[in-house]
Amino acid sequence: MYNAFWDHLKEQLLSTPPDFTCALEILKEVKEDCTTKWLTKAATDLTTPSPSSLGSLSSSILGCSLPNWAANSSELPSPTMVLYQGYLNLLLWDPDDDEFPETLLMDKIRLQETESQLHQLTILASVLLVARSFSGNVLFSSPEFVDKLKCITKALAEEFNSRPQETMVSVSEQVSREIHQGLKDMDLTALSSENTASLIGQLHNIAKKENCVHNIIDQRIRLFLKYCLVCGMQESLRDFPGGLSLIEGELAELGWKFFNLMHHNQQVFSPYYAEILKNIIPQAQAQETEVESV
């Protein structure tokens, strides 16, 4: 009888699409400490804004404003926003933390891949933003030039996590050479020695944890992913956060990947999350008894 149950569970999970009926029955019988802790932290994060929250992002640094939908998140019900915050927190998960939410264990590897892709895009967008600030819009109006810089940066940045300083030294040297050659090919004014040194220095600094450009780009990408969940993909793709225009294609790919993964999880476990959230969110705030699907 025992083996028959587990065989049936395996058969359901491997079916196309997966059938989670048995899995949900198991969850009803098991005390989900990790899932509860995960949602509790998400609720705390929403009620305790951090210095890196939406309201504190500096538009002046990137020379642009946040998209229109950035002001509309409060319209969604609290339980839904808590769940979305929980999903975003998965992209900041400490790999040494074993208390991963049980309802997302099957998606853990794909979430780790998504997190890695997010980090790569942060480096790429940071490099392009700094490079454009020195070389000007004329050079960056060339799709061929931008694509070449992207290919170079992506290839060199693959080792960023293990060798951040060394990686950015290589990136800065190669990017500097490409900008010099690009300006020459277009008969534009070459960078002065002082500006070249400043460019290389700012690209080096992207490797530092406290680097302003790196941190704001990271926040903006996470903001975009949040609103992929809040507003849906079509709406989000019409209005990218400032500073990310040079990676719109890559960002759209990341957004779809994250949206589809989390949307499927929400559809399957929404009733279960609603039961947990009723005990986490004060009744005055919990106006819904179920988490709405996207």
Image: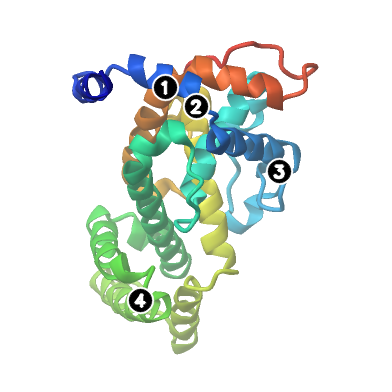
Residue at image location 41% in from the left, 65% down from the top: 127
Please name the amino acid that badge 1 sits on. Answer: Ile
Q: Is residue 19 above or below residue 127?
A: above
Q: Which residue is mark 4?
A: 167
Tell how many labels. Answer: 4
Q: Within 10 Å of the Cα at label 1, are there few (<14), some (14-19), or many (20+) other Cα atoms? A: few
Please state which of the two labelled residues, at mark 4 or mark 3, is closer to the viewer: 4
- Kind of residue at disc 4: Thr
Callout 2 secondary element = loop
Mark nearer the viewer, 1 or 3: 1
Cα–Cα span, label 4 and label 3:
32 Å
For the residues carrying marks 1 and 4, which lies nearer the camera in this image?
Answer: 1
Residue 30 numbered mark, or none: 2
Considering only order in the chain, which callout, 4 or 2, is on the residue closer to the N terminus? 2
Any mark on residue 26, and which?
A: 1
Residue at 51% x, 51% y is: 92
Residue on which disc 3 sits: 55
CB within 8 Å, label 1 to label 3 = no
Q: Residue at x 26, y 53 (%)?
A: 143
Look at the image and tell me whether residue 268 can be seen.
no
Type of amino acid at the residue the image marks with label 2: Val
- Tell which circle, 1 or 3, labels the residue nearer the N-terminal end: 1
Q: In the image, is 175 to the left or to the right of 25? A: left
Q: Which mark is residue 220?
A: none
Question: What SS does tag 1 mark?
Answer: helix
Task: Determine the secondary structure under disc 3.
Answer: helix
The residues tagged by marks 1 and 3 sit, at their Cα atoms, a distance apart of 41 Å
Who comes first in sequence, dot 4 or dot 3?
A: 3
Between 32 and 150, which is closer to the camera in this rendering?
A: 32
Q: Residue furthest front?
A: 1
